[in-house]
Amino acid sequence: MDFLMGSGLIIMIPMILIFYFLMIRPQRKKDKQVKEMLNNLKAGDRICTIGGIYGTITGIKDDTITLSVGRENMSMVVARWAIRSVEEVTIENDSQELLN
């Protein structure tokens, strides 16, 4: 009986380690990168929201971000957590890009 308990434990430990390194650790790393990206947002950054809206940050206040969106530079307020990514490429003339 003790042998069965010991062999079950021997199998469970590697399974837990595999689970940790394949699922938990990468998710923590990704969460850390997202948190860092959200903390480093600043006015002038081009961003994409989780809803697929592209805009330029015009103001930041606590947990809300004001965006300038579209050809008419409409103002839009979104939650900080709704920012998916910061775009690396800056577009000089949004209206030219939108028409093409």
Image (tube, rainbow, N blue to C red):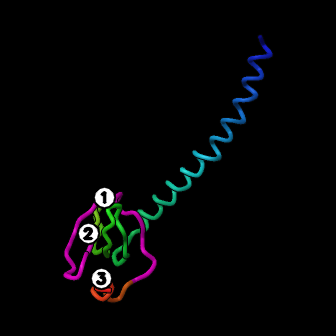
Q: Position of residue 71 (x, y in %)?
A: 23, 82
Residue, far top: 1
Amino acid at pointer 2: Thr
Please check the rendered image and state whether residue 79 is part of the magenta-colored stretch, yes or no.
Answer: yes
* Residue at the spot 31% in from the left edge and 76% down from the top edge: 56
* Residue at the spot 77% in from the left edge and 20% down from the top edge: 6
Q: Is residue 50 above or below residue 72?
A: above
Residue that label 1 marks = 63
Amino acid at pointer 3: Leu
Task: Kindly check if marks 1 and 2 are in contact, taking CB atoms under 8 A apart as contact.
Answer: no
Q: Nearer the viewer, residue 43 or 90?
A: 90
Instruction: Tell me where residue 73 sits by quadrant.
Output: bottom left
Residue 44 horizontal side relative to residue 8, left or right: left
* Local crowd size for mark 3, using a 10 Å CA cut-off: few (<14), some (14–19), many (≥20): few
Q: Position of residue 99 (x, y in %)?
A: 28, 85
Per the image, label 2 sits on a secondary structure element best described as: strand
Amino acid at pointer 1: Asp
Chain-order first, disc 3 or disc 1: 1
Residue that label 2 marks = 66
Q: Is residue 66 above or below residue 16?
A: below
Q: Position of residue 53 (x, y in %)?
A: 30, 68
Instruction: Tell me where residue 37 sits by quadrant.
Output: bottom left
Q: Position of residue 3 (x, y in %)?
A: 80, 16
Residue that label 3 marks = 98
Chain-order first, disc 3 or disc 2: 2
- CA gap, disc 1 and disc 2: 10 Å
* Local crowd size for mark 1, using a 10 Å CA cut-off: few (<14), some (14–19), many (≥20): few
- Which is closer to the viewer, label 3 or label 1? 3
